[in-house]
Amino acid sequence: MNENAKYLEKENIGQLLLNYSLPAIIATTAGSLYNIIDRIFIGQGVGPYAISGLAITFPIMNLAIAFGTLVGAGAAAIVSIRMGEQRYPDAIRTLGNATILNLIIGLLFSVVALIFLDPILIWFGASEHTISYAREFMEIILAGNIVSHMFFGLNNIMRASGYPTKAMISILLTVTVNVILAPIFIFWFDWGIRGAALATVISQLIGMIWVLAHFNSSKSIIHFQKASFKLKWRIVNDIFAIGLSPFLIHVCAAFVAVIMTWQLTKYGGDLAIGAFGIINSIAGLIVMVIFGFTQGMQPIVGYNYGAKHMDRVFLTLKLTIFWATGISIIGFLLTLLLPEALSRAFTDDPTLLSITSIGMRLYMLAFPVVGFQIVTSNFFQSIGKAKIAIFLSLSRQLLFLIPFIVYLPTQYNLTGVWIAQPAADIFATLVTGGILFWFYYRLKQKSNLSLENKPYSS
């Protein structure tokens, strides 16, 4: 057995979760800085309407992420499970198939989106004040979409195959390059919002080269082999089956962002959209810390589920929920107590600051439950329970959030738009908790899994 794989099966769970989560937290948090860096520099260097224009692009960005996640997250989970089952040739074939799928899907998405870019932006809510900013940004981002798909997709597989530190380094490398290039392109070269987009694409290109070099080395546990690049329907189906859950999350998020933009335009105007962009950036940074824990959890849970060590699977889940909930509470307190201070990093416009501060407090009201909700949904994805993960993803977005976004503003105007999110989080958490309870006790009946806490090394 490979030492990295044996480590997943035998190491103390608390230490294992720390070792895998810490690099993932650094990587995901640093990765979210792409958006924050862009919005801070754009807000300070271009203006408040540029922030609103950037916010208009959220649905397209979510759709791009959705197709990348369909392959990347699905392949990462499959690789972990196959390694736990000691099926290393299948894990290598999954890597090769994921690489080809990223190329095909990334190219098709870019072509279609670029052809219909203006109509899409107008439908998403772009106005005469914001469409030029949105167009300039997305033209460059879409031109580099294949790079983004390849980089993030393969980086997920790198982490899942036992290299969390290298995966973290690749993200830190791209963020460092982006931080250096963005202000140079925006302020020095005076390229405005196009400069921010170009800095992002160049930084991801460098990260992609790093990741490709890793998988091109035979020293890596899972590495490129010529035969693995031939698409196999069984492997593609497995990738899509598991990747469908996060894919639907991002597709629904894109749809939600469109409806959110429509409602913000109707009840608050262009600057309300800009406020949403700022709030979304801050909330997204906190959520990325939680996603770091789930990414650290994923290879541990996936491997031990494949190896049928259920006590280790559920102990990992419990610890991840505990830490993710703590992060959620910290995020809630920061946004409740310091909304204006956080917003000032993005803008000095007094009207935009006022709208953002009020909206942030309302939008984050139920944030303490978000950690549990995210971890549990990702848990089912990590063990290959695609149907459950998909249901949890859809229930939050379709059953709760969209109806609240549509209805609550009719009663409370702009306030109703902001409180739709916490209302949906509360209902979705109740559903998620019920399904986890059902799954745990159903599995316990089958395997006599003990409810008692066991030592971390069990």
Image: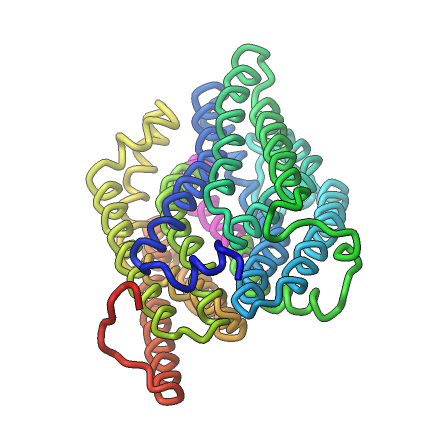
User: Where on the picture, by quarter, is residue 313?
Assistant: bottom left
Q: Residue furthest bottom?
A: 445
- Would you say the magenta stretch is mainly helix, strand or loop? helix
Q: Residue furthest top?
A: 188
Q: Indicate yes or no whether the magenta region holds residue 256.
A: yes
Describe the colour scheme in one phrase: rainbow
User: Where on the picture, by quarter, is residue 193?
Assistant: top right
Q: Which residues are magenta?
A: 255-275
* Picture layout, residue 291 above or below residue 33: below
Q: How many marks?
A: 0
* Picture layout, residue 437 above or below residue 202: below
Q: Residue at x 34, y 37 (%)?
A: 356
Q: Indicate yes or no whether the magenta region holds residue 157.
A: no
Closer-to-camera residue (337/103): 103
Q: Is residue 406 visible from the viewing direction of this image?
A: no
* Picture layout, residue 247 above or below residue 39: below
Q: Residue at x 65, y 34 (%)?
A: 209
Q: Is residue 56 visible from the viewing direction of this image?
A: yes
Quadrant of image for the C terminus = bottom left
**In the displayed structure, does residue 333 sit left or right of residue 57?**
left
* Picture layout, residue 21 above or below residue 388: above
User: Where on the picture, by quarter, is residue 316?
Assistant: bottom left
Closer-to-camera residue (16/425): 16
Query: Residue 204, position in %: x, y?
Result: 60, 34
Query: Residue 205, position in %: x, y?
Result: 64, 32
Query: Residue 19, position in %: x, y?
Result: 37, 48
Closer-to-camera residue (60/330): 330
**In the displayed structure, does residue 95 sit left or right of residue 1?**
right
Query: Residue 89, position in %: x, y?
Result: 67, 62
Q: Residue at x 51, y 30 (%)?
A: 173
